[in-house]
Each structure stands twice: as C-alpha cells, then as structure tokens.
Amino acid sequence: MPAFRCDETAADEQLLAGIHPLSGPVNPDFSTKGSLPFAAMKRAHVKELRDTRSDAPGAANNITKAISAMFAWAKDAELVEVNPANGIKRLTSGNGEGFHTWEVSEIVQYEKRHARGTMARMALAIFMFTGLRLSDAAIFGRQHITQVRNKDTGTWEKWIRIKPGKTDKSKVRKEAIVVELPLLPELEDELSFAPAGNLTFLVTEYGRPFSENGLGNKMRQWCDEAGLPGCSAHGVRKAGATVAAENGATHEQLKAIYGWTTYQQPDHYIRKARRRVVAQSARTLLVFDRNENENVPLLEGVDESGTKKYKKPN
C-alpha cells in the first residue's frame, strides 16, 4: 500500500498537473513515509486499493479497515477533515454469505485425502467439533481440557474450557466470554494422536505452535491438497453451526458453543435449517398426478348412470 504524506500544497499541485494521487516518485529522504500526499486521497482511491485484493474479500476489507483507522486518527489529530474510507461497503463472496460452508461430501473428501493421525485431520476435527476460530484453534491445547462433574449421573466428564480471544476486549461486557462445551468422543479420538509435551495440539513440522495466519495458510494448503479450493477453516466452523441447527440446537445452545453474544448470529443458521426441514417435509407436494384429468373407461356391464346391466338368461 503506498504511503501518504500530509502536504496539501503538493496535493493541489499534483491534482492540477493531472498526476494520479496513487502514483508518484519515491521520496529518497523519507522512503518509509512515502511521497504521496494523503490530503489528496479520495473514496475512489480507497476503493481502488481495496479492489487490488478483490480475489480475497476478507483481505480487501482489511485494507479498507486499515485506511479507515489511519484517517480516523488523522482526523482526531486535526490533520485532515474527512475520512475517505467512511461508508465504503464491505466486499462479500459470490453468494453474499461470506465463507463457503462445507458440505458433508466435502468433509468426506477431505478425510479421504488426510488420514487419521495427521495434523490436517486433527485440524478438521478441532474446527468441526469445537467451533473455535482460527486464532483460538491455534492456541488450543491440553490446558483447555478439564473435568466437570455431571450433576445427573455423578460421573466426571471431559469438557473444553477456553476464552475466545476475539471477545477479550468486548465493549459491552466487563468480563470476557468463556466458552465451555463437552469434549466429544470423535474429537478426543483425534486428539489422542497429538504428540505429548506440546503446548498446543496443532503444531508446525518443527513442533512449534501455529500463528493465526500460519494455521490459516496451512489449512488452505490442506484443502488444496484435498481438491477443495473453495473451502476454508472458517467454512468448517459454519458447517458445524449448520449441522447443530439442523439437529435442533436452540439460540442459547449455539451462543454457548460458538461464544456469540447476540441472537442475530445463531438466528441465521436456525432460520436456514428450518427452511431446509420445511422443504424436506414438503418435497412430495411438488409431485403431481399426470393421470388426474384422464377419462377412465366404463367397465363392461356398467352404463353411464352407474347402473349395472344384466343379461337375461336364455
């Protein structure tokens, strides 16, 4: 991204000369600051920078957010009067629903490519059976598994207890949200392959914990190896929420599992699940009788009035 300097005179001179504000000579004295005057930056220029990553909507939106944050600071410091990034719409994927939600067939395809005991297979299980985000899956380890006593049966059960990083600095809550959910047998089985002594279950080939971006890139590689270029780590999280909703999960249950704080987030999955259930139950209503309007020939010995005809015996 080009850097901009605060030089309104230079900005006016460039605009009058017809020089595009996003192109210009490198400033040899201030190479890190750049030679382009940010006072000349307009909404069109922000969109142009955003669209350089139109292939990745998330990255494109992050560019807009970064520019907006920079100009918000500059406006507060009275260096500029307008934030050119204000009101610029976020990019979405082609279906308008963000990351692609994995289908069951895609999960099976991924599992066929990556055998049990591999990091790739363990990562899928963690995303699928915990609903953790990338940042939280990267730090997920044995320290997040605890024993909880079941009040009904009196037995001890293994539970996952983790504080999602995304909600640590919530502006609407004094305390960060803590996600607690049972450790499912399917996930426990996959985690049994994790090497002992590591701080996290998922580690690099060098035995070190992944960074958030590193795990995202690795998951991208594993999906590509399985022939799933449209799938991502976040899409597995969405698949888990979809399955839970279709199995009858309530708003409160989904909020508890995924660390959501509003009803709007689980409502999306519940409404979608209900539509699918209703469509499933109504599938036979689309079938029509092709013989409905055909005339049925009268049986022999029956006249049109419905009276049976009898032949007199000889």
Image: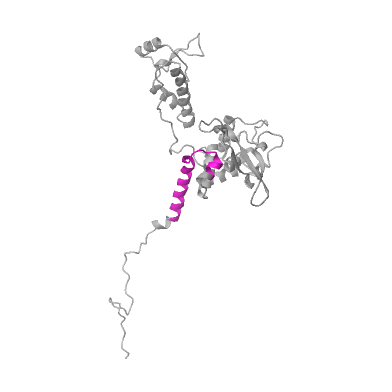
Q: Position of residue 280 (x, y in %)?
A: 45, 53
Name the magenta segment's main secondary structure.
helix
In depth, the one of 96 and 264 nearer the eye is 264
Asked whether residue 227 appears in the rendered view, the answer is no
- The answer to whether residue 186 is seen in the rendering is yes
Please identify the residue farthest to the bottom as the structure is shown.
314
Q: Position of 302 compared to 190: left or right?
A: left
Residue 188 magenta: no
Asked if 296 appears above or below 259 in the picture, the reply is below
* Residue at 67% across, 38% down: 142
User: Relative to residue 71, is residue 176 depicted above or below?
Assistant: below
Q: In this image, 279 relative to 311: left or right? A: right
> Quadrant of the rendered structure where residue 259 is?
top right
Left or right relative to 158: residue 238? left
Q: Which residues are magenta?
A: 253-281
Q: Residue furthest top?
A: 29
223 or 237: nearer the viewer: 237
- In the picture shown, does residue 135 fall above or below 302? above
The residue lying at 57 percent from left, 42 percent from top is 128
Q: Position of residue 78 (x, y in %)?
A: 43, 15
* Vertical comparison of 118 with 86: above or below: below
State which quarter of the image contains the C terminus: bottom left
